[in-house]
Image (cartoon, helix red, strand yellow):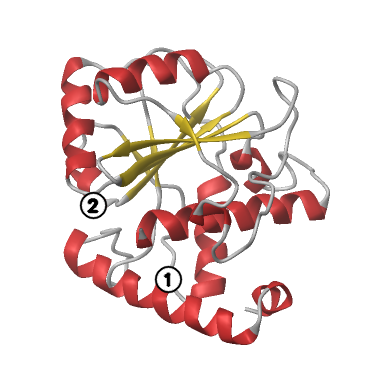
Amino acid sequence: MNKIRKCLPLYTVASELIVFISLMITLCGVYAYAQDKNDKNEGDLFAIAQIHYGGGGDWYEDRTSMIRLQARIEKEFGLRAAPGRRVVRIMDDDLFSYPMLFMTGHGNIVFSPEEVERLKEYFDRGGFLWACDDYGMDESFRREMKKVIPGSEFVELPFDHPIYRKPYRFDRGLPKIHEHAGGPPHGYAMFLGPRMIVFYDFNTDIGDGLEAPSIHNDPEEVREQAFKMAVNIAYFALTQ
């Protein structure tokens, strides 16, 4: 809360919190969202599941990123975060328990025909995917997503898109966290009708910026930019 107040007027902070928390309550009922029960049966907990995909790519990268993002969202918005990392395969029964998924890696990605159909269903039912290029997954990820949503293309989002506006403002689009391909970062999206179903950050690696300092010891200001952008992505995914 204190960090938000440093960046936004108090009335804006209050309104953003009310909207976000209200949406979370709604999503808990509509999606049975984040159905991870703790050992004391204390109810539903907030979680973003990381996709364990096939094809030989290192799907397991960013081992601490979603844990730390969940904790940040809990701190800022009062949602109780699930302990530990949540990993899901596309064919797992609990895929639809998560309104937001995350995937990353450096290598090859392959979806089976059954996984393609399952992802289509996931998106049809309101799901959202955040994909983060850890340098090397771009070609295979684009190829596989064409199978999931034939005829759809990734489009680069303008800097005035809402994902760069709430709750933190990024007037120049994605912050630059890590240098990979050279040049500026790019934020791409795929839509199903008017609804964004995929956000894809390229040539910046927001996910690495969320990692524990023992893994990626980025300067504090760089890490904070990654967290703010990740909060924006989650906020947009769950409130659009």
x and y, in percent, of residue 20 in the image: 41, 72
Say which element carries label 1.
loop
Query: Which quarter of the image is occupied by the N terminus?
Result: bottom right
Say which element carries label 2.
helix
Residue 152 lies in quadrant: top left
Residue drawn 54% across and 63% down?
A: 166
Q: Is residue 153 above or below residue 143?
A: below
Spatial separation of the CA atoms under disc 1 and disc 2: 16 Å
Residue drawn 24% across and 20% down?
A: 150
| Residue furthest right in the image | 219
Of the numbered discs in the image, which one, if any, rests on residue 80? 1
With 18 as the anchor, is 10 left or right in this view? right
Q: Nearer the viewer, residue 45 or 140?
A: 140
With 211 as the anchor, is 138 left or right in this view? left
Q: Is residue 32 above or below residue 49?
A: below
Badge 1 density bin: few <14, some 14–19, many ≥20, Cα 10 Å: some
**Residue type (three-letter) at the residue carrying disc 2:** Ser
Badge 2 density bin: few <14, some 14–19, many ≥20, Cα 10 Å: some
With 157 as the anchor, is 36 left or right in this view? left
Residue drawn 71% across and 31% down?
A: 184
With 81 as the anchor, is 171 left or right in this view? right
Q: Are marks 1 and 2 in contact (CB under 8 Å)?
A: no
x and y, in percent, of residue 106 in the image: 56, 20
Q: Is residue 123 above or below residue 104?
A: below
Residue occupied by mark 2: 97
Q: Is residue 152 visible?
A: yes
Q: Is residue 108 visible?
A: no
x and y, in percent, of residue 108 in the image: 46, 13
Dot placed on the residue nearer the N-terminal end, 1 or 2: 1
Residue drawn 57% across and 54% down?
A: 164
x and y, in percent, of residue 132 in the image: 53, 34
